[in-house]
Amino acid sequence: GAGVSQSPRYKVAKRGQDVALRCDPISGHVSLFWYQQALGQGPEFLTYFQNEAQLDKSGLPSDRFFAERPEGSVSTLKIQRTQQEDSAVYLCASSSPGDWTQYFGPGTRLLVL
Amino acid sequence: AQTVTQSQPEMSVQEAETVTLSCTYDTSESDYYLFWHKQPPSRQMILVIRQEAYKQQNATENRFSVNFQKAAKSFSLKISDSQLGDAAMYFCAYGTGTASKLTFGTGTRLQVTL
């Protein structure tokens, strides 16, 4: 089947704009993760969903970051009032019950000018 | 908090040769999982190999194998018979369960030369 997809693949935003990043996990995958990957760094955890429940949001850097997964499938990561330090690649990953492997999407590269 | 350290920012290997990438981690957990992921330029992250901490036997996947030293908290990746397609960023990662966030190292950029 299809892998994890993310849209848009690239996003340029002016400082202060709101952005929404979408993740379509693999069908049937219960767990969904968001990571932020700054240039030249490893991914850093942002938040985790199990079905529609957001069980861990300890990695969200500020209250400008908000994520949702209302029907337990597609997830949206929203960043309000974007700032230059938000520029990064945002990765989404999903996994099925009992599987330790997380399957990553291609990422959304966000550039805030 | 768990940390993952990759002390080699860049490595280079000749085609058909063998290279070892280093990773150390710190945790107080007794049961956990370790992973090596590959991220080619502008392409998505894929799993290369994984190891359960409770297993003493080192994991192998074709040309990729690990040297897992639990007491030393070391988890190195060996790539044998290197190919041009192995050129990528390699990230070591740690997780504590099937629904656990991953903690990544800073990565090692592997170059493969002719």
Image (tube, coloured by chain):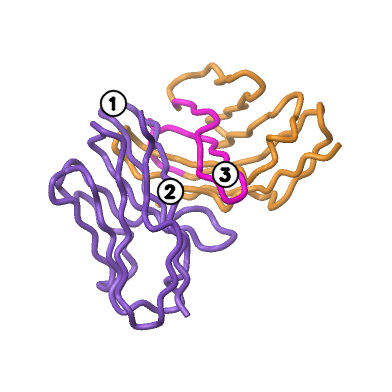
Chain colours: A purple, B orange
Which residue is tagged 2? B2
| Label 2 and label 3 in one chain | yes
- Residues A12 and A83: in front is A12
Q: Residue at x 65, y 47 (%)?
A: B108
Whether residue B43 is in magenta: the answer is yes
The magenta region covers: B27-52
Does dot 1 land on a helix, a strand or a loop? loop
Q: Residue at x 44, y 47 (%)?
A: B103
Whether residue A74 is in magenta: the answer is no
Q: Are marks 2 and 3 in contact (CB under 8 Å)?
A: no
User: In the figure, residue A47 lies in which quadrant?
Assistant: bottom left
CA gap, disc 2 and disc 3 = 22 Å
CA gap, disc 2 and disc 1 = 22 Å
Residue A45: which numbered mark, if any?
none
Which residue is tagged 3? B39
Question: In the figure, is residue B30 to the left or right of B93?
Answer: left
Image mark 3: chain: B
| Coordinates of residue B48 in the picture (x, y in percent) | 55, 31
Give the quarter of the figure containing the C terminus of chain B: top right
Image mark 1: chain: A
Q: Earlier in the sequence, mark 2 or mark 3?
A: 2
- Residues B59 and B56: in front is B59
Q: Nearer the viewer, mark 2 or mark 1?
A: 1
| Coordinates of residue A1 in the picture (x, y in percent) | 35, 28
Residue A98: which numbered mark, if any?
1
